[in-house]
Amino acid sequence: MHYYQFNIGDYQSHTSHLSDMEDLAYRRLLDWYYLHELPIPLEITEIARQIRMRSHSDCILIVLQEYFERTADGWVHHRANKEIAKTGEKSEKASASAKARWNKKDANALPTQSDSNATHNTRHITQDTLPNSVSKDTGVKTPLSTDEIIFGYGVPLLTNAGTAEKNARSFLGSLRKVHGDETLVNTLRDCIKAKPIQPLEWLAKALPPDGIKKNPADIIFTTVPASKLPDPALEKIKADEKITRPPTLAELEKMALLRKKA
């Protein structure tokens, strides 16, 4: 899971006695648990490395013993297990509902775009790659359409991380308009493989929505003058050297005569 609901009041009422480092350990352990949907490893040094708290194994152990249950497979969190199960049930029910609507249609009729998105939007995105669709009649894999890839997999990728569906569609539409279908599809594949915690930020960095990418040559031109143009800073240095140069021997002799006359 890339997103889970967090009840601030409930959390504080159960953790107000924790030290700062114990509280940090608990939050990171919960994030790891929801992200991987697996029990926490029994080896304390290993989980300490994974949550970036190598020098605080004692705090990690205190939290595990208080909020988790040790099993043969690792440390489990029963409340988190319930939330993960609820998310899976909702996705399965929504997917089953969408498939039921598809089955009512004529077998030879193509599904509408809204139905296609309904089926894919309810899918829990954990795939490393975007699969191909399978024909019910022949069982032969056929390539997914561009719309199915962009909205069928891109929208749930963002909504599972907390982005509203309307905002997710608008964001993907703007990227598609600026960068084109092929670039966006390839970037979505890379994003799903990378499994970032915040896919929207990942995509925005990989594909700026405004489509403007600075040319390094432009930056150099604005900071370094062309070789044929005089450098204002260099010209100023040369002018200062003329003003502050030491006097010549003739000038020193003339100055000495003037002092004698004075």
Image (cartoon, rainbow, N blue to C red):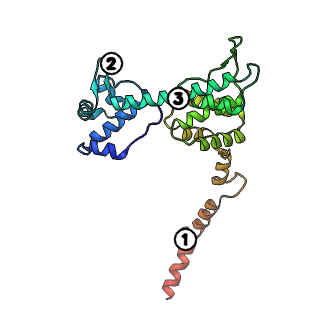
Q: Say which label, 1 or 3, has the lower sequence index.
A: 3
| 246 lies left or right of 231 | left
**Marks 1 and 3: CB-CB under 8 Å?**
no
Q: Answer few, some or many: residues within 10 Å of disc 2's Cα (few below 14, many 20 plus, some between 14 and 19).
A: few
| 179 lies left or right of 204 | right
Q: Pinpoint residue 130: horizontal percent, then vertical percent.
A: 61, 24
Q: Secondary structure at mark 2?
A: loop
Judging by the rendered image, the residue that carries numbered circle 2 is 73
Amino acid type at image mark 1: Pro
Q: Pinpoint residue 14: horizontal percent, then vertical percent.
A: 27, 42
Q: Pinpoint residue 208: horizontal percent, then vertical percent.
A: 63, 43
Q: Answer few, some or many: residues within 10 Å of disc 1's Cα (few below 14, many 20 plus, some between 14 and 19).
A: few
Q: CA distance from mark 1 to mark 3?
A: 88 Å
Instruction: Looking at this view, name the residue that lies furthest to the front.
Output: 104
Q: Residue drawn at (48%, 27%), measured in percent from left and top?
A: 89
Instruction: Looking at this view, name the residue that lies furthest to the bottom.
Output: 262
Amino acid type at image mark 3: Ser
Judging by the rendered image, the residue that carries numbered circle 1 is 247
Q: Would you place residue 172 above or below residue 123 in this image?
A: below
- In depth, the one of 249 and 29 nearer the eye is 29
Amino acid type at image mark 2: Asp
Q: Pinpoint residue 164: horizontal percent, then vertical percent.
A: 56, 43
Q: Would you place residue 68 above or below residue 17 in this image?
A: above
| 18 lies left or right of 169 | left
Judging by the rendered image, the residue that carries numbered circle 3 is 91
Q: Nearer the viewer, mark 2 or mark 3?
A: 3
Q: Quadrant of residue 235?
A: bottom right
Q: CA distance from mark 2 to mark 1?
A: 88 Å
Q: Say which label, 2 or 1, has the lower sequence index.
A: 2
